[in-house]
Amino acid sequence: MSASREKKKRFEERSEGTEKRQVRAKDTQKTQKRKKLITAIVAVVIVVLLVVAVVFNSNLFYTGVAAVRVGSEKYTAADFNYEYFNNYYNTYSNLYNTYGSYVSMFLDTNTPLKDQMYSDTQTWDEYFEEQAFDQLQQITILNDMADADGFSLDAAQLAEINQNIEDIKTSAANAGYTDYRAYIRAMYGKGITEDRLRTLLEKSYRATYYSRDLGDRWMAEYTEEAMADYYDTVRNDYDLISYMYYFVDGSADEESGLDADTALAQAYDIAQEIASARDQVTFADAVYRYAPEDQKASYEDEDACLRRLVSAGSISALYKDWLTDAGRISGDTTVIEGTGGYYVILFLERNGNDYRLANFRGITIAVGVDETTGEVTQETRDAAQELVDSIIEAYNEDPTEENFALLADRYDESGDNLEGGLMENVVMGQLSSLEVEDYVFDDATKVGEVQTVYEDGFYYITYPMERGEKYDLFIAKNLMVEEQYNSAIESAREDYPVSTTFAFSFAK
């Protein structure tokens, strides 16, 4: 190979090597750039994830962002939770007070609310959510109305809020919480602070007291004539009815060979016999005579079938129309077919609530019973009588309402925890003692004329006070105010639409 050709070859090889080195260099640069870019992206992602983690675990979506909007008013998830869980606790408490240990049949604390049905179409979760939305809406409307009216809470009402918070602190301590703030978070969810709780309480109290103020102003405008006319439109739901009631069972009795048709026919004949009675005593005697042998003991008392002063609105639809007929007179009877038998009804009287409500103070003393028999004995009654005599003696030393109230606070054993034994706006049919009821509703009873009676294991000491307003007008004005209030709220709702935001997903 000539020198010139070798030279050319070496040049080409160097050129090729240079080019390869350049390519490798460029590839290296690209790789380094990609690594830097990936590192930067990873760093950004990590920062974003850290920020998201911090935000999601902070109170931001509970207290810093609107979760619910009511008109122009904004509420956080924590605000919503307060209303939601308040509804839950109040509902559970009411159900427990009514059903005791059977409460779980209606509302089970061990099952998610979204998995329990409140009604055929709504879960408990949906119900409490709906109630919370409605309360936030009403609170907002009423606070805006209060603003326009210049209404504010007075010192006594503000003191109630302070007491409410102190009561919650006491509950926290009783529940074993050393930190009150931890307790309210446990009760109402993340984000609730003492300041926010106070703000929510103030809005709620203001709405409540403003609505009462509105009601008082509206009531002052109602005339007696207007209230009487209104009551006439609802009396079939509120008049009090006294009647006798008995169901004659017409079920078949296979053991005695009584088929269904024969049994029902016999029940009808018995019902007609009982329906021939025209007064309480005759009706009670007939029921006792025809009652099955294993039930006779239940009907020895002539009041066993008596339904006294029952609100018409609570009477069965089967015979409500008959009992509330305007032409019904004492002694009327009827037989109404029911499922598997017949109802026999004797109308006694209709009370149109045309009486004045009773106000009085009372002291109830329970008579002890024998530890072996569980019965009241002369010895236990004498002991109770001795206590009653000492109370009357203490009252007579200073025969004033104030002294009686102090004695009631000290000695009353009714369990009602009434301040000074005070009973206000008492309705007929509400008291356990018929003798006390007769006394406080008797127009001849004088204010401060103390009476003592014994009835069914209890001594009742009664201090009568001035009677209240007529009950029919009392019913009417309260219904009128309720209608006026509902109308005012409903007319305002469309200006206060309720909507939710992304932050609402953090509620509940």
Image (spheres, helix red, strand yellow):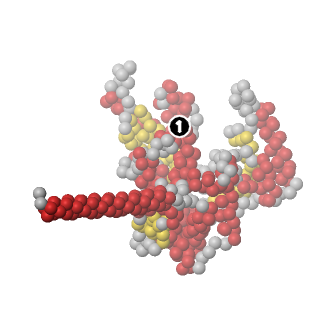
Hey, what amino acid is under mark 1?
Ala
Q: Residue at x 63, y 56 (%)?
A: 181
User: 424 above or below 491?
Assistant: above
- Name of the residue lying farthest toward the right: 397
Decide which of 162, 356 is in the foreground and name it: 162
Residue 405 in the image: state x and y as whole percent.
77, 56
Residue 381 in the image: state x and y as whole percent.
77, 36
Decide which of 211, 475 is in the foreground and name it: 211
Residue beneath disc 1: 284
Decide which of 30, 321 is in the foreground and name it: 30
Residue 399 in the image: state x and y as whole percent.
83, 57
Q: Residue at x 56, y 29 (%)?
A: 297
User: 499 above or below 265?
Assistant: below
Q: Residue at x 72, y 60 (%)?
A: 465
Image quadrant occupied by the N terminus:
bottom left
Residue 316 seen: no
Q: Is residue 139 left or right of residue 468?
A: left
Residue 125 in the image: state x and y as whole percent.
44, 52
Q: Which picture quadrant has residue 9?
A: bottom left
